[in-house]
Image (spheres, rainbow, N blue to C red):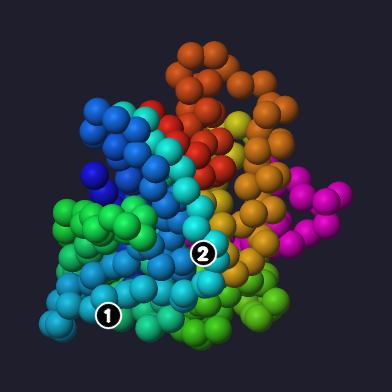
Amino acid sequence: MVTLDVQEPVIFGLSVLGTLRVTNRGATSVTISSRLNLMEGDVRLTVFGPDTSPRELRGWQADTILRQATLAPNEQLVGSMNLLQTEAGPVFPTPGRYQLQAEFSPSPRDAPVTSPRIDVDVRSPQTDAERGAAELLANEVVRQSIVLAQSDAAPNEIAQLAKKFPETLDGKLARLILAGTSDAANRTHFTSLDSSLLDVPLISALRTPFSRVGRQLAEDFTRKIQTLNAKQGAQQANLDSALRIVEGKPMKAS
């Protein structure tokens, strides 16, 4: 079973986090691709726009080796994607109501599995911070830098997003990108359990095959989160789930 969720609010011109879940609801274990992103060929999106024909988006296609995971019954893989931009352009080119549907290829031998359609309402920027971030992201190079987790193509704009608009999603992504490109002595972003857990979907989205930043952030998160004093019970369960998402490993389905 494949499901797609989108984090709200969805603001025109700003980053959008989509979360893909692939769940084994069968009675036996299955081995599937663990490449839950738009950049390696196993995930595709169909976008039904307000006044346009459906568009199929495949994103940038990286030539990478197949990575797989084995899901026991009632286990799932979870991955996040930034739906701001693909190689074909913006996912949401105008404000309005959209529908999204994901298609996932479990393996080269198996037929693709399609998620249910979901409704997505895209509104215009409303606050000064939203408008300011959208102005910077009007530049396609900046959008690609955020989506591909590459700071060198638009370093000034990434720095501005991080400094001027830190509470926007793009400001948070920019701060993580800068943290992941810092030398080891300066990588001090993950300092508390609660704030680090909130970064998990962002780290997952930044872990692209086009950049080491996401992989570095995942390594830093795994190493540093294990040194924090996690509480027992539900908090410990949350920590375990967060580590599995960041590392791209199976976890219990809800």
- Left/right placement of residue 241 relative to residue 152 reads left
Up-down: is 61 above or below 65?
Answer: below
Residue 42's x, y, as percent?
38, 62
Q: Residues within 10 Å of mark 1 (few under 14, many from 20)?
A: some
Q: Is residue 129 visible?
A: no
Residue at x 60%, y 31% (from the top left corner): 193
The quarter holding residue 121 reads bottom left
Residues rendered magenta in the picture: 169-191
Residue 85's x, y, as percent?
42, 75
Up-down: is 80 above or below 96?
Answer: above
Q: Residues within 10 Å of mark 2 (few under 14, many from 20)?
A: many
Disc tally is 2
* Residue 175 located within the stretch drawn in magenta: yes
Up-down: is 227 above or below 48?
Answer: above
Q: Which secondary structure lies at badge 1?
A: loop
In this orientation, which residue lies closer to the viewer: 170 or 19? 19
* Residue 243 located within the stretch drawn in magenta: no
Residue 62's x, y, as percent?
52, 72
**Circle on res. 129:** none
- Left/right placement of residue 224 relative to residue 113 reads right
Residue tagged 2: 170
Residue at x 46%, y 76% (from the top left corner): 60
Residue tagged 1: 94
